[in-house]
């Protein structure tokens, strides 16, 4: 479909048509999770109603069908990310588990005393804490890469911090708090000159613009299905084939082995050696449906629509006295984290909720990002392709009434 009309997306998403507190819902909490099109809900229902089976074992028809569905999902994720081979895709519970997998396998095998992991200040806690944990164990160091005043990664500082001690750069392709879209391709190329690996956290990016891991050149790319209009509890890790092949397995158990004997066990090939136990088969089916749904739209047109919606939102919110938006890096995506003078963000969220408008208040699992702006908590309206200018106007007028309702 050429061009993009948000009504085409809205029609498919049942939750968007409910009311909350007597008002039509305005869902502006897409940074926390996205709403699900009926195609995803139906795919989950159809799987459990007609096709449920465990996979990779049992020589019966439904096991074969479930295996095909699961591996079809892997191929869909590979296609979605621009990965040459489905074997580059490991299913995980989500972004958090994917980062922990890399930290615990690649990290444990590769890091040593004095090694450095560069982590920009804008990272989500799930791209900070797993590195701190493995760094502590291996006596390596997590080195923060500072931000500029507008919330971009300071590229001069990044270039200065890179050295032959750098073993990994862990960077988001889009910030879930500031909306910043760092120049990940350039950062990856620079990091590779020092022999460092690069992990890209795509959790906040994948729903907003097309991704091509081959073009990015990243060694690892991770994302969560639930932020991509798919189910919770499913996500993926992309790894370059030669990098995955050199990594030890993570959790031990069924499905990840070749031979088990009390003298020792051997492991299944990549990616199965990283998928111990029964996975979220239905989740993979739902994620596949979500990818099919999102890619049925003209994604360049979707990105352009969201950029225009961001500009509209920035303008509408500028009319609210005392409102300050955190993050203004050029090319940012439609995430509006803000403070309102004299108001606790939790109070702002409660006020909006009473009017059917869902935003999030708190630290958004990115405390260092907020501290960069000198705050511990903020309100966040995060937009998706199914949001409209009318919804943004409802947000702005409600905030204006809150300010005017004053004390
Ligand atoms: N990284 C970023 C940039 C995110 O936006 C999120 C989710 N808000 C995560 C990581 C963590 O994702 P999950 O909780 O699905 O593992």
Image: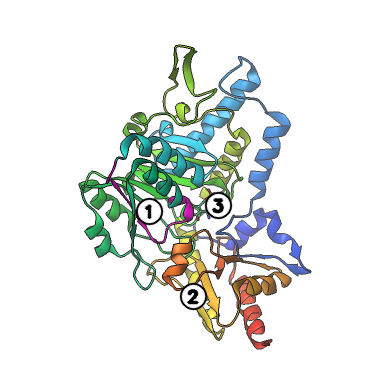
In this rendering, the answer to whether 266 lies above or below 134 is: above
Q: Please, what secondary structure does the residue beneath circle 2 have?
A: strand
Between label 3 and label 2, give the one nearer the viewer: 2
Residue on which disc 1 sits: 171
- Residue 167 located within the stretch drawn in magenta: no
- Of residues 193 and 77, the one nearer the viewer is 193
Residues at badges 3 and 2 in contact (C-beta under 8 Å)?
Answer: no
On the image, which quarter does residue 320 sit in?
Answer: bottom right
Q: Please, what secondary structure does the residue beneath circle 1 have?
A: strand
Q: Earlier in the sequence, mark 3 or mark 2?
A: 3
User: Residue 325 got which mark?
Assistant: 2
Residue on which disc 3 sits: 227
- Residue 118 located within the stretch drawn in magenta: yes
Marks counted in the figure total 3
Between label 1 and label 3, give the one nearer the viewer: 1
Instruction: Give the side of residue 287 with respect to residue 220, left or right.
Output: right
Q: CA distance from mark 1 to mark 3?
A: 18 Å
Numbered range of the magenta stretch: 113-127
Residue 198 appears in the picture as rendered? yes
Q: CA distance from mark 2 to mark 1?
A: 22 Å
Q: Residue at x 41, y 45 (%)?
A: 221
In this rendering, the answer to whether 75 lies above or below 224 is: above
In this rendering, the answer to whether 172 lies above or below 148 is: above
Q: Residue at x 52, y 28 (%)?
A: 276
Residue 230 horizontal/vertical position (percent): 59, 46
- Of residues 290 and 132, the one nearer the viewer is 132
Query: Ligand 1 closer than 8 Å to the CB at disc 3?
Result: yes
Q: Earlier in the sequence, mark 1 or mark 3?
A: 1
Q: Residue at x 75, y 64 (%)?
A: 19
Which class describes the residues within 10 Å of circle 3: few (<14), some (14-19), or many (20+)?
A: many
Q: Residue at x 35, y 41 (%)?
A: 138
């Amino acid at each position: 479909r050429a061009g993009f009309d948000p009504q085409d997306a809205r029609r498919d998403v049942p939750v968007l048509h409910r009311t909350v507190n007597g008002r039509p819902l305005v869902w502006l909490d897409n940074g926390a999770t996205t709403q699900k099109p009926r195609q995803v809900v139906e795919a989950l229902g159809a799987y459990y109603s007609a096709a449920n089976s465990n996979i990779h074992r049992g020589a019966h028809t439904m096991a074969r069908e479930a295996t095909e569905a699961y591996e079809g999902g892997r191929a869909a994720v590979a296609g979605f990310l621009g990965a040459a081979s489905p074997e580059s895709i490991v299913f995980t519970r989500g972004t958090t588990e994917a980062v922990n997998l890399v930290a615990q396998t690649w990290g444990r095998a590769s890091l040593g005393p004095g090694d450095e992991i560069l982590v920009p200040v804008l990272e989500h806690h799930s791209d900070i804490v797993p590195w701190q944990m493995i760094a502590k164990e291996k006596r390596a160091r997590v080195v923060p890469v500072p931000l500029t005043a507008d919330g971009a990664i300071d590229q001069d500082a990044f270039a200065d911090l890179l050295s032959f001690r750098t073993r990994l750069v862990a960077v988001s392709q889009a910030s879930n708090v500031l909306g910043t879209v760092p120049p990940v391709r350039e950062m990856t190329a620079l990091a590779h000159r020092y022999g460092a690996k690069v992990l890209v956290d795509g959790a906040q990016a994948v729903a907003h613009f097309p991704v091509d891991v081959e073009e990015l050149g990243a060694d690892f790319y991770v994302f969560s299905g639930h932020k991509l209009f798919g189910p919770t509890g499913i996500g993926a890790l992309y790894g370059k084939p030669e990098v995955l092949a050199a990594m030890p397995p993570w959790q031990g158990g069924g499905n990840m082995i070749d031979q088990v004997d009390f003298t020792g066990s051997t492991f299944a090939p990549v990616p199965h050696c990283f998928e111990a136990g029964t996975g979220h088969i239905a989740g993979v089916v739902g994620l596949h449906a979500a990818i099919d749904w999102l890619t049925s739209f003209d994604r360049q047109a979707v990105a352009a629509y969201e950029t225009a919606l961001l500009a509209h939102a920035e303008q509408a919110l500028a009319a609210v006295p005392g409102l300050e938006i955190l993050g203004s890096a050029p090319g940012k995506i439609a995430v509006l984290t803000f403070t309102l003078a004299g108001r606790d963000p939790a109070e702002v969220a409660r006020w909006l909720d009473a009017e059917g408008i869902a935003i999030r208040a708190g630290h958004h699992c990115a405390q260092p990002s907020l501290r960069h702006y000198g705050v511990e908590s903020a309100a966040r309206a995060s937009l998706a392709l199914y949001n409209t200018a009318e919804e943004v106007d409802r947000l702005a007028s409600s905030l204006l009434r809150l300010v005017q309702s004053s004390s």
